[in-house]
């Protein structure tokens, strides 16, 4: 069949078919005119079916002429005696042309449908292959071969965006070079180019779309399938690349999460190992004091153990902050609740001071309540540590339209202006603070915790005398 | 006298907790890991379990889950985790309370005593319960304060009833919502806070400094029949009226 349908074969073949038919009809002489006409029309039909419209028309004309010359009396002339035969010949010609046309059309339709079916099957196979691949390297490695088969092309070359914002050939099948100027054009402007190839078929340069952007350029040389098919393949490739990118992102997120979880677990185990001996020692001293009666030494040991435990807390908090696992989980809470929670938790440190709470209902903030409570706790400890025993510590909530301020005011000696920022650095302790136990970590922790929650910690001179510790947070609305 | 099971992988902690509980008149058995604790638990009847969260073989979290499948015995956890969400997870799994290492022995004994006041096998609130000057009568659905009836809304009554069913235990927000509304869907901890505030105004001697219905910041609520924690109450606090 394919031999019969080579280019250039059509017209002579159609003529030959008509001639052969006439010869055959002359061998079986004595056939009626109508039989002859039907057989000739069959030859026209076949010519149009096999060699399409042009040869079909030629066959119809030849058949009409042959019918007249060989079968309509007077024989072997083109003259027609009986006027009825003129009409018959005319009807024959029209029928021949119509049959030829219809037959060629039907054949063409069939071929289109067949080509579309093949394209669809190829696209389906291609998408299945792309979906099965979850790794970029292996995807690209086999993509060009699969595309070559699907597009019936001589050569496929795939160009992808590189990390410098340019474009480079990422994969290709062996073969002749592609024009990089057309690749650039498709990449920069999103224009596709298609023109007849010296390899036969079409050369096509197609942008590979990802959403409204482009992931790269697909080049097919000597393309046999349709341009539409090539475009569909480019789109499919874009989807496959996009999918692969999202899979990689999801994998990375999963890994980060797993690593964060592992860090959290390790840190929890570390905290457990550090705290358990302190807990045991504290319990032992308390039991001892309970059986032997309280003593100054027991009291001292207990105080020291509480201090040790607090230092461990601070160190653990610093490690958590540095390892990046202390991500805030925000919710909307009343600032007052944070004050209440901090006073409840750090009440021990404030036992030697008188505490003045100024409530302010309805001031809402959206923060990780545990973290901000911890930060405020450091402020309270600071105030307790650096103001005289028995003095007053004031805790208040101030709120304006945009900001909620949690404030701790003490009546201690205050901090010099020059030192106010320095004390937020890690391990920085002022000479005046040497008699107060502490690690120099509290304020730095407080600042980090509050910053993670979108706020800011500052120190200022309190009105009159002392220090004002302030956590400023954006006000939340419900 | 109550029987207490103490599970901790650290020998020193076991000794300290055992001494403290024995001194306050309890009988104590110990286990060095979660699996041993579970085996001990199955052998004898205990009125209270004190367990470390961080144990080898079977950790405290898993121990709580398995004990909860077997019995309603009160469970007090020892933990170093200061993160509220970890505590909530522990409580939601069925623990009743926790103390954070390094805990004070006095605090531990007080918490244990509060949990032991729960009568064994009684999941519901006792018919009549007195705290401070309040008398709660479950059968009659009435609450008296200083002998005079106090009107509680049905939600407030359910809340109080739930809290009284486990004196000393911490309830997470989720647990209370589940107990009162039967579901946690569509109920926010805000709603809970509002009802709790109203309940306190009706029952607490000083609603701004609640003695009986305590807030566990970011975790939930706890009903303390009598002020068990001397420490917290000793912090002197002055409060100014709002504004």
Image (cartoon, coloured by chain):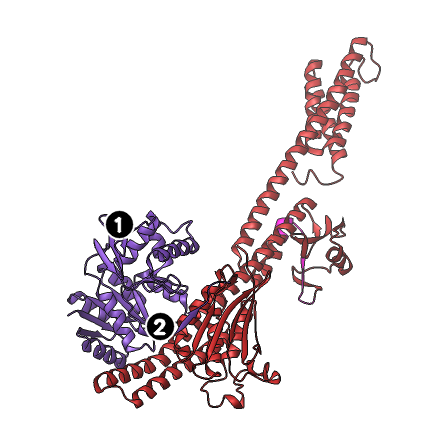
SS for tag 2? Answer: helix
Q: Nearer the viewer, residue A7 or B191?
A: B191
Q: Is residue A58 left or right of residue A157?
A: right
Q: Residues within 10 Å of mark 1 (few under 14, many from 20)?
A: some
Q: Is residue B20 left or right of residue A166?
A: left
- Output the letter for the chain in purple: B
- Output the letter for the chain in red: A
Chain under numbered label 2: B
Chain under numbered label 1: B
Q: Is residue A266 left or right of residue A198?
A: left
Q: Nearer the viewer, residue A211 or A124?
A: A211
Q: Which residue is mark 2?
A: B232
Can residue A154 be seen here? The reply is no
x, y percent for residue B11: 25, 80
SS for tag 1? Answer: strand
Which region shows up in magenta?
Answer: A148-164
Residue contact at pointers 2 and 1, CB within 8 angstroms: no
x, y percent for residue B52: 30, 72
């Amino acid at each position: 069949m394919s031999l019969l349908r080579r280019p250039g074969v059509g017209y002579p073949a159609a003529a030959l078919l008509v001639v052969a038919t006439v010869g055959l009809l002359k061998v079986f002489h004595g056939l009626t005119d109508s039989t002859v006409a039907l057989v000739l029309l069959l030859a026209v039909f076949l010519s149009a079916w096999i060699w399409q419209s042009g040869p079909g028309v030629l066959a119809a004309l030849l058949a009409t002429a042959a019918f007249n010359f060989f079968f309509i009396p007077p024989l072997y002339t083109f003259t027609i005696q009986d006027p009825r035969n003129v009409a018959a010949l005319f009807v024959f010609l029209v029928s021949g042309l119509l049959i030829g046309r219809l037959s060629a059309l039907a054949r063409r339709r069939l071929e289109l449908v067949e080509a579309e079916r093949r394209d669809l099957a190829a696209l389906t196979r291609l998408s299945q292959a792309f979906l099965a691949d979850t790794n970029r390297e292996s995807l690209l490695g086999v993509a060009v071969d699969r595309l070559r088969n699907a597009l019936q092309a001589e050569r496929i070359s795939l160009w992808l965006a590189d990390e410098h914002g340019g474009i480079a050939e990422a994969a290709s099948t062996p073969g002749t070079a592609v024009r990089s100027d057309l690749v650039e054009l498709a990449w920069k402007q999103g224009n596709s180019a298609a023109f007849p190839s010296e390899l036969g078929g079409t050369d096509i340069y197609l942008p590979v779309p990802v959403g409204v952007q482009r992931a790269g350029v697909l080049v097919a040389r000597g393309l046999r399938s349709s341009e539409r098919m090539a475009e569909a393949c480019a789109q499919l490739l874009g989807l496959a690349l996009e999918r692969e990118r999202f899979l990689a992102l999801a994998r990375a997120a999963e890994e980060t999460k797993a690593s964060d979880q592992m860090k959290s677990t390790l840190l929890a185990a570390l905290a457990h190992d550090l705290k358990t001996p302190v807990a045991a020692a504290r319990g032992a001293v308390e039991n001892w004091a309970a059986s032997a009666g309280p003593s100054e030494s027991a009291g001292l040991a207990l105080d020291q153990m509480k201090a040790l435990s607090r230092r461990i807390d601070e160190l653990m908090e610093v490690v958590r902050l540095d390892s990046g696992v202390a991500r805030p989980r925000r919710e909307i809470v009343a600032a007052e609740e944070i004050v209440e929670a901090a006073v409840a938790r750090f009440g021990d440190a404030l036992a030697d001071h008188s505490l003045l709470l100024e409530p302010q209902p309805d001031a809402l903030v959206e923060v990780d309540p545990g973290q901000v409570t911890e930060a405020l706790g450091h402020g309270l400890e600071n105030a307790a540590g650096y103001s005289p025993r028995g003095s007053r510590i004031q805790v208040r909530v101030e709120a304006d339209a945009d900001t909620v301020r949690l404030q701790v005011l003490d009546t201690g000696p205050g901090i010099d202006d020059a030192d106010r920022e320095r004390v937020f650095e890690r391990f920085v302790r002022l000479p005046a603070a040497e008699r107060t136990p502490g690690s120099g970590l509290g304020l730095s922790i407080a600042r980090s915790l509050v910053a993670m929650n979108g706020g800011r910690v500052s120190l200022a001179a309190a009105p009159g005398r002392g220090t004002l510790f302030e956590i400023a947070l954006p006000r939340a609305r419900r | 006298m109550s029987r207490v099971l103490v599970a901790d992988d650290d020998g020193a902690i076991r000794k300290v907790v055992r001494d403290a509980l024995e001194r306050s008149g309890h009988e104590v058995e110990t286990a060095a890991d979660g699996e041993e604790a579970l085996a001990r638990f199955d052998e004898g009847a205990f009125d209270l379990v004190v367990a470390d969260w961080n144990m080898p073989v079977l950790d405290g979290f898993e121990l709580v889950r398995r004990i909860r499948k077997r019995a309603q015995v009160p469970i007090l956890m020892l933990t170093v985790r200061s993160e509220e969400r970890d505590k909530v997870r522990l409580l939601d799994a069925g623990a009743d309370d926790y103390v954070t290492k390094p805990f004070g022995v006095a605090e531990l004994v007080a918490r244990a005593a509060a949990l032991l006041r729960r009568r064994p096998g009684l999941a519901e609130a006792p018919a009549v319960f007195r705290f401070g000057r309040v008398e709660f009568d479950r059968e009659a659905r009435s609450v008296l304060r200083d002998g005079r009836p106090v009107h509680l809304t049905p939600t407030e009554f359910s809340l109080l009833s739930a809290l009284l069913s486990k004196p000393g235990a911490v309830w997470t927000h989720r647990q209370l919502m589940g107990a009162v509304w039967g579901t946690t869907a569509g109920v926010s901890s805000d709603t809970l806070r509002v009802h709790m505030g109203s309940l306190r105004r009706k029952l607490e001697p000083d609603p701004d400094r609640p003695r009986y219905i305590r807030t566990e910041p970011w975790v939930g609520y706890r009903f303390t029949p009598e002020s068990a924690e001397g420490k917290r109450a000793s912090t002197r606090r002055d409060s100014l009226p709002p504004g």
